[in-house]
Image (cartoon, rainbow, N blue to C red):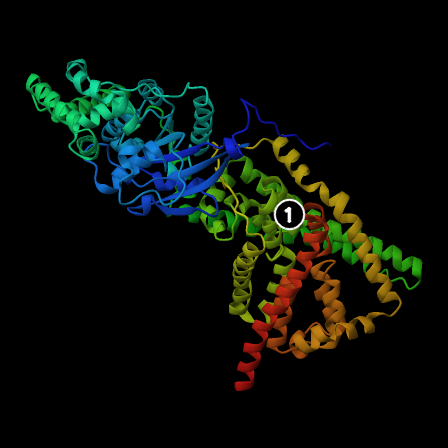
Amino acid sequence: MPSTAHTFPLHGPGLRGARRPRVAIVGRAGSGKHSIFRAAASTSTRHERLAGIGAAYEECLVEVGIDQISLVALPAIDGLHHLDADACVTLKYLLWGDRWPAIARHEPHLPASAFDAPDVLLVVLDATALEHDLELALELMQLARPMVFALNRMDEARARRRFINVRALSDKLGAPVLPTVAHMGIGLADLFTAVVRTAREARHAHALPPARSPSPHIEAQLQAIADIARQPEVAEAFAVPETLLTQQLAENDGYFAQELQAHFPGRYAAMLAARAIAGAALPRPLAEEIHADRHHRAAVMYEAVTRPGQAGAPPRWQVWADDIFLHPRWGFVGTLAVFALVLSFVFEVSALLDGLTVARLIAWAEPWQPTDLMGVLARAVLDGFIGLAGIVIPYMIPLVLLLVWLEESGIMHRVAFVVDQGFHRLGLHGGVALPFLMGLGCNVPALAATAAVTHGRDRTVASLLITFLPCSARSAIILAVGGKYLGGFGVFALFMLAPIVVSLVGKLLKRRYPETTPGMIQEIPAYAVPTLHALLSNTWERSRDIVTIVLPLLVAGSVVLALLSHYGADAWINLALTPVTVWWLGLPVALGVPILFGVLRKELSLLMVFQALGTQDLGSVLDTTQIATFLVFLTFYVPCVSTFAMMLKLLGRRDALYSVVLSIGVALAVAAVVRWPLALAKWAS
């Protein structure tokens, strides 16, 4: 069955590299700017201060489909009138980037680093305070920049029984308006798709929202000031849209009026005279009249697009589900519930299936112990097929079916969004949550799933880290041996080692693979009931490689080890591994072969330990330090030949071999860290 090809519609040249647009997130404090940036941000962001003063901005690279954008989160701004020092710097960067015009070149704090003016403004509106934010929107339109509006906190607006007609609001603003719930990731994929579309259209001058003129009675009184703003030498010196300069000179005595006075004193005097004449002709001073008019226009727009009620609200069950899976505080409860469901399958359902199928196959084959060469080879091939069945039947098929169901239902996307920030610490994105969950069952399907959701550097790092997760086979050994000889606390400590090791190795890999991963938008799809066809086809798609790739290596490995055993090479293997087993790990020399056989299947290691030591009561021949050391080493060293086969396919020979060296090195290091404190404590007591 050929693999499915993914296609993307092309609406023009890709926005990448030199064509990558710069998108600035703008809005008031508390509107959700930071939540939107954090949800889209890459694993590495740039922090700089505007002109070396004021609040810092953040910037990162974000992938939106096949396009890219440079996303900038600017400091909060409440409006363009009565600007304080920080807001004034923000406005300068919105207008000019780092290329300040003549009137600003005398500033004591000039741009300290490259900062291109934004190509698109992503304006965040608070749906619970929309009337106030619409005033800011009307002011920002004076910047004459392409805009996209994020109508954020829609969940809270609905909870307050306030319905907002998004389409009507978009028509009135003359720019795309997308409803979002940023802290839950809802609507962000559509939002950034609209941003890219607007950036592409802006290249053809089709994406500028219409400049909103004040009411006719005010506009007539602004003509004299507008004449000053459009004079060639004034327009060139300020390099701002005429409408903005006119409104700033008419409404404020701040930055623009001060610069006009400093550079064009004659025009400044004429501007003051024009303001006085306009103020005399209006019911109130000109500045107050402009502000009142803007407030009135925002209120009229607000009333036109909102009404009380629950129209357009999602079903109540969906709201409850999103509160479980996406809430900033309670979302981890839903994530933990998903982990519990997966672990239940691994340790309960999979164990039951293993006992009903593979355990019976092993018991059926056990009496056949051939001594001739052909019989030994045949038994080795049979063991390879049994080993494959031991992966596929109890662990892979049920686990992959469960995880495909979680993905098709939309739950897994929500888990990925919640854990995204945690994975950022490892230099990865939350999209790898699914493969990591699968790794608790079996590393082989986990690596196959990694290929579907990552590429490049992310794929390499995620694949290397997945091999350190305790799969069901390793977990079974920890539970069986650790539970009997180390107690509940010992088992808990062994399992807690896994996230610690993954975190430490993740930091190591960030140095080996230092390139920054672009941000990605975590799509939050609607909930759905998966179809049987989708479940079966996706399960097969993610499982088929094990037949073509893993089976040959599993059989080949089984044959090689059977030949070594047949010709009596066990003693030589144990002798060769003495530096590891005896000197470093402090284990009996006879455990060399069981450790080596673990590369086929971890359960084989445990069975061969019993055979090598001549007893199933490990406590009679090993102390607790040796048992703990053995379990730790078995948990982290080379997972199995099946995993190595998948690594070989995904990463190539170089990184696959590096994974072997890394896992052996980490296993030896962690085992030593566990062994020596326990040994010293025992000696001290």
Left or right: 449 as drawn, with respect to 237? right
Q: Position of residue 470 (x, y in %)?
A: 60, 58
Depth check, front residue: 131 or 278: 278
Residue 481 appearing in the image: no
Left or right: 510 as drawn, with respect to 47? right
Residue 68 against residue 144 in the figure, above or below: below
Q: Position of residue 514 (x, y in %)?
A: 55, 52
Which quadrant holds residue 560? Answer: bottom right
* Amino acid under disc 1: Leu
Depth check, front residue: 297 or 467: 297
Residue 113 against residue 659 in the figure, above or below: above
Left or right: 610 as drawn, with respect to 434? right
Residue 320 against residue 46 in the figure, above or below: above
Q: Position of residue 178 (x, y in %)?
A: 38, 27
Which quadrant holds residue 237? Answer: top left
Q: Secondary structure at mark 1?
A: helix
Q: Image point 33% across, 33% down: which residue?
A: 94
Q: Position of residue 29 (x, y in %)?
A: 28, 40
- Callout 1: 10 Å neighbours few (<14), some, many (20+)? many
| Quadrant of the image containing the N terminus | top right
Depth check, front residue: 107 or 660: 107
Q: Image point 68% across, 61% down: which residue?
A: 661
- In the rendered image, which residue does mark 1 sit on? 447
Residue 677 appearing in the image: yes
Left or right: 192 as drawn, with respect to 220? right
Label total for image: 1
